[in-house]
Each structure stands twice: as structure tokens, then as C-alpha cells.
DNA sequence: CTTAACGCCTGAAGGC
DNA sequence: TGCCTTCAGGCGTTAA
């Protein structure tokens, strides 16, 4: 389940491998990811285009072409890019044929970029030259941007009665966080996930911002978190899962306080993992 | 305006 | 063995 660190890892991998490559053709095996086009038009739209740059915007991956056309991809739950220098690598073993490849780009130099997506939630959206990308104003600031200040976050949490856990998953408030890193950041900040947004004081908001940035920075350094589906474009796993303190640690001893057992509760139909001692409902106590 | 629920999909895991 | 239910969770849509 790619969140900001996983998407950043994918983008860095793509930058190293497919920038400057020219598309020979695109084969589409499932039309669903193409939200504003169809397989034939999609291929026609990008055929012979040269990739100029690839960047991340929240959890979106933006392909910029030399023609100033754009392709914006969201991996959602199970989307994955796989770069192959040679397609024969992808099916060299007959008993291990890749499943769920929804489309692939073939480049002029015979290399391939495969898009694999088990659940087909991922999206590809094309933008013609000069057309503004709607994603730019659809989501809030990146956690690392200078716009993401305590003042900004406080303003966004003002009058919000939803739990802070749920609010941090809202991409309009802050872009890039998903269930894993929200749980981890709240644990690092020592904030109870059920605390309503408007109840956080200035100190807690500042602490939360620091915690979010530290967690994400470290996760990027370790190449993201591989729980089930995520991998780098060379199919290597991320390594941050070994640093997780609460996510999917239900029943385990909290390694921060060495006292309480990590618990799991549902919030807005999603699992929240937290330590009742380090993140008490009594908001007075916070971790150092 | 905010909040809550559901649909989209497939595969893994657990209960009986 | 095998069928059924639940869970995984990002995000758009719809309804209240």
C-alpha cells in the first residue's frame, strides 16, 4: 500500500531508469486504470513521446514528456511499476509468469516498464500539452513543504470534531500519509489517535509535524515499507517495516515504554494501532 | 459546511 | 478438503 515514502521510492527508481526514454508503444491489457481515455487512444497519445521528468505530488506520480503532455498515475492499493531492461526477463520462467500486468510501455531501446495492479484501483490520467493538472489543487501541502507549518495545520484542525487519526488521512489537510505512517507518527508524537482535531494544542501540533517529518524521512531512507504488495521498480523490498513501532503490532509489547501492549481499534472502517500508555487519552502526557 | 457509509477489486487468512 | 466471511485501505461518490 504505497504512501509517500513508497511513492517517493518508486519515483526515484523511475528517474534513474526511464527518463529520456522514448515510448515505442503501449500495450493495455485492462482498460480500467485509464480513467479519461481508452487503450487505443492512450497508445496513440503517448506513442513516440520522450519522458523528460518524473516527480511526486503527494501520492501521485507525474510523468512529464518533452511535448509537455503529462501522465498522472496513482498506485492506490496494489499498483506497482516494474522496470525490465529486456522483456524476456519477465517471462523467462514459464511457471512463474507475471500476473496482473494491466499495461506495459515498450521503449525504443527495447526496455519495458510494466504496470502491475492486483486490485485495479490504480489510475492513469492523461493531460494534453498546456492543460493544467487538476491534482495540483486537489490535495493539501506536502509534509516537507514550507507551507506545512503549525499555523497551517492548526487552522485546518480548528472546529474539526473528527479524530486526529482520521483527519491526518485526509489528503486535503496533508498529502502523502496513509494508515501506516499516520499510526506511526501519532505514536512518535505521543498523541492519542481518538483525540478530536480541535482539541490538539499548539505544542501537540508542532510535535506532530516534527514526528510526521521524521518518520517519513527515515522511511524514505530505508526505501519504504513492504508489508504485502509494495516493492521497488526492480522488485526489491522496502526495509522500513523493521522500524515500525505500532502498525500491525497488535498484542506485542510497546518497545517505547516496555510496559503496555499495542492495541488495535477501528476508526472510519480502518485499523488504528496505538500504545495506550505512550498515547493516553489523557492528553497531558506526551513522549519526549 | 462536516460527517458517515459504501463501492471499487483480488487474494490471503481464519472459522467451521 | 472446501466453502463462506472478513480483512487489507485509498479515494471518489453519495447521502444525511
Image: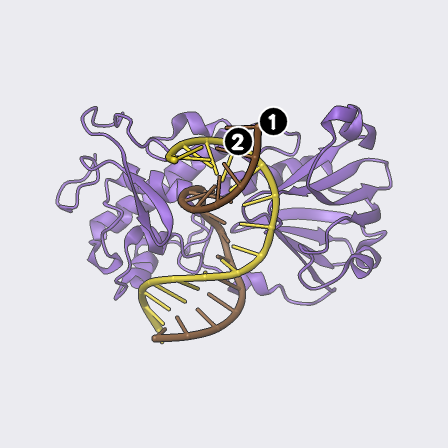
Chain colours: A purple, B yellow, C brown
The image quarter in which residue A275 lies: top left
Earlier in the chain: of badge 1 and badge 2, it is 2
- Per the image, the residue denoted by label 1 is A236
**Relative horizontal placement of residue A76, taking residue A276 as reference (left or right):** right
- Of residues A63 and A77, the one drawn nearer to the viewer in this rendering: A77
Quarter where residue A95 is shown: top right
The spot of residue C13 in percent (x, y) is: 52, 69
Whether tag 1 and tag 2 are in contact, CB under 8 A, the answer is: yes
- Locate residue A47 relative to residue A247 in the image: left or right: right
Which residue does the image show at 18% across and 35% down from the upper left?
A277
- Decide which of A193, C13 is in the foreground and name it: C13
Q: Quadrant of the C terminus of chain A?
A: top left
Q: Which residue is mark 2?
A: A223
At mark 1, the secondary structure is loop
**Residue A48 on image: x %, y %:** 85, 51
**Distance between the Cα atoms at labels 1 and 2?**
9 Å
* Residue A226 visible to an observer of this rendering: no
Q: Residue at x 80, y 24 (%)?
A: A92
Q: Up-down: is A162 above or below A30?
A: below
Amino acid at each position: 500500500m504505497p504512501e509517500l515514502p513508497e511513492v517517493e521510492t518508486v519515483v526515484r527508481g523511475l528517474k534513474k531508469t526511464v527518463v529520456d526514454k522514448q515510448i515505442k508503444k503501449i500495450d493495455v491489457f485492462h482498460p480500467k486504470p485509464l480513467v479519461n481515455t481508452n487503450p487505443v487512444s492512450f497508445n496513440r497519445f503517448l506513442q513516440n513521446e520522450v519522458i523528460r521528468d518524473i516527480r511526486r505530488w503527494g501520492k501521485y506520480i507525474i510523468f512529464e514528456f518533452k511535448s509537455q503532455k503529462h501522465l498522472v498515475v496513482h498506485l492506490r492499493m496494489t499498483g506497482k511499476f516494474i522496470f525490465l531492461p529486456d522483456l524476456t526477463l519477465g517471462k523467462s520462467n514459464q511457471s512463474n509468469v507475471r500476473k496482473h500486468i494491466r499495461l506495459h510501455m515498450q521503449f525504443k531501446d527495447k526496455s519495458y516498464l510494466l504496470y502491475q495492479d492486483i486490485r485495479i484501483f490504480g489510475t492513469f490520467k492523461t493531460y494534453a500539452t498546456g492543460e493544467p493538472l487538476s491534482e495540483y489543487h486537489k490535495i493539501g501541502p506536502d509534509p516537507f513543504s514550507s507551507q506545512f507549518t503549525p499555523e497551517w495545520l492548526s487552522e485546518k484542525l480548528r472546529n474539526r470534531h473528527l479524530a486526529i487519526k482520521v483527519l491526518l488521512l485526509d489528503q486535503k489537510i496533508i498529502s502523502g500519509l496513509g494508515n501506516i505512517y499516520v499510526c506511526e507518527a501519532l505514536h512518535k508524537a505521543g498523541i492519542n489517535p481518538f483525540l478530536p482535531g480541535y482539541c490538539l494544542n499548539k505544542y501537540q501540533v508542532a510535535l506532530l509535524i516534527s514526528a510526521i517529518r521524521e518518520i517519513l524521512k527515515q522511511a524514505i531512507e530505508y526505501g519504504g515499507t513492504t508489508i504485502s504488495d509494495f516493492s521497488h521498480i526492480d522488485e526489491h523490498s522496502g526495509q522500513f517495516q523493521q522500524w515500525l513501532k505500532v502498525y500491525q503490532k497488535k498484542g506485542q509489547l510497546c518497545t517505547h515504554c516496555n510496559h503496555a501492549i499495542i492495541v488495535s481499534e477501528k476508526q472510519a472502517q480502518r485499523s488504528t494501532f496505538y500504545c495506550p500508555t505512550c498515547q493516553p487519552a489523557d492528553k497531558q502526557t506526551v513522549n519526549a
